[in-house]
Each structure stands twice: as C-alpha cells, then as structure tokens.
Amino acid sequence: METHDHDHNEGSTLTEMDLRVRALETILVEKGYIETAALDRIVELYETKIGPHIGAQVVAKAWVDDGFRKALLEDASKAAATIAEQVGRVGEHLVAVENTPQQHNIIVCTLCSCYPTDVLGLPPAWYKSFPYRSRVVKDPRGVLADFGVTLPAQTEIRVWDSTAETRYMVVPMRPAGTEGWSEERLAKLVTRDSMIGARLAKNPSEVK
C-alpha cells in the first residue's frame, strides 16, 4: 500500500476536517443525493434561528420576567416557542429545570446524545462522549470540578437524563451585580455549557 509523507492540506487555509467535509459534500451533490441549496438553508437555519443564542434569550427573559419564568418551568416547549419559532421542530418535550442555591441541575443522555438542539444548538463533543455520559451520573460533583465549578457541600446536584421524547435545559442562576441589566445584555452571560449545567453563567465582568 502506497504511503504519503506529505500534508494533503498544504497550500489551503482549510482544516483537514473542513477539507473532508467539502469532499463529502461534493461527492453527495455530484451523485444527486443532496442539493447545495438545501444545505445552504440548513446552515442558515443553524446560524440564525437555532442555537444557544435562543436558549440564552429564554433564560434572560426568565431572569427578568417572573411570569415568563413560571410559564417556562410549567411548559418549557410552549414558553420557549414564544421566543423561538423553531422550538418543537423535532417534536421533543422540552423541560426547564432551574438552578437555585439549594439545587444545581446538570443534563446528560446516558444512552446516546439526546439534547435540546433547537434552543442549545449542536451538542459539544464532550456531551456525546462515553466518559461524560457514564461518569456524570456517578460523580456529578467531580465532573463539575473538571469544568471548574465547585459548589457548596450543601447544594444538591441533580442529574437529568434526556431521552428522544423529553429533553432538558438548565436555567442557571442569575449572577449577582446584574440588577437593572437589559435582557439583551443578560443573555450575553448565558452560555451553552451553563444551560447544560456543566458551568455557571458568566461573571458580569466577563461581558460589556
């Protein structure tokens, strides 16, 4: 078998993975399995209407609007749909769980990688990894420590196992020192990882 000692990526600004994706796309288009226009629409959807920026808006509104917060905790799919028209597109039942000083929530899918894509975007690689899925149910406090999160000993940690029918999002605690902030500014504090429960919301000093 012939071997190569040179870099196939030589002369290109694209990564090896980008090149592989481009090559796969080219083959599928040439064979007529997919249409470029359809791919463009999917990419646009994920860039503008689906992703963690939607979840961040949902959380920020829950922080400032107690009526919305209660509605979100009662029926997250219905409440979130008032902000994101694509929520519910895949048919899952979305459940919002709220972090408090007494309870911290973290989500996982122990069987595969079920995840509320519509409000959190694509799941991170670590969420899908076997080490995370297996360890977080046995040692959630240790997993959180790996993410740099150390909670008081009296704070209960609850792990929620997503399924194809029911998916969870965490409403992180609103950081202190954000009184009077607009929803738009508050949303900048909310990250994908904080809505999984693996991290806390950003510190106010981290955003403008």
Image (spheres, helix red, strand yellow):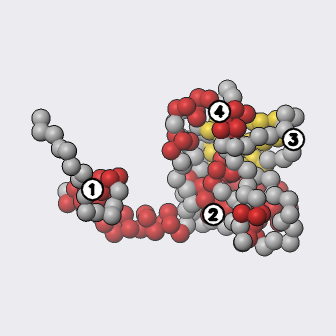
Vertical position of residue 44 compared to residue 160: above or below:
below
Q: Amino acid at mark 3?
A: Gln
Q: Which residue is mark 4?
A: 136
Q: Residues within 10 Å of mark 1 (few under 14, many from 20)?
A: few
Please, what is the three-letter code of the amino acid marked with disc 1?
Answer: Asn
The residue indicated by pointer 3 is: 102
158 left or right of 84 in image: right
Q: CA distance from mark 2 to mark 1?
A: 35 Å
The secondary structure type at the circle numbered 4 is loop
What residue sits right under mark 1 in the picture? Answer: 9
For marks 2 and 4, give the one nearer the viewer: 4
Is there CB contact under 8 Å for labels 3 and 4?
no
Q: Are marks 2 and 1 in contact (CB under 8 Å)?
A: no
Toward the viewer: 10 or 158? Answer: 10
Which of the two labelled residues, at mark 4 and mark 1, occupies the earlier sequence position?
A: 1
For disc 2, the marked residue is 54
Quadrant where the C terminus lies? bottom right
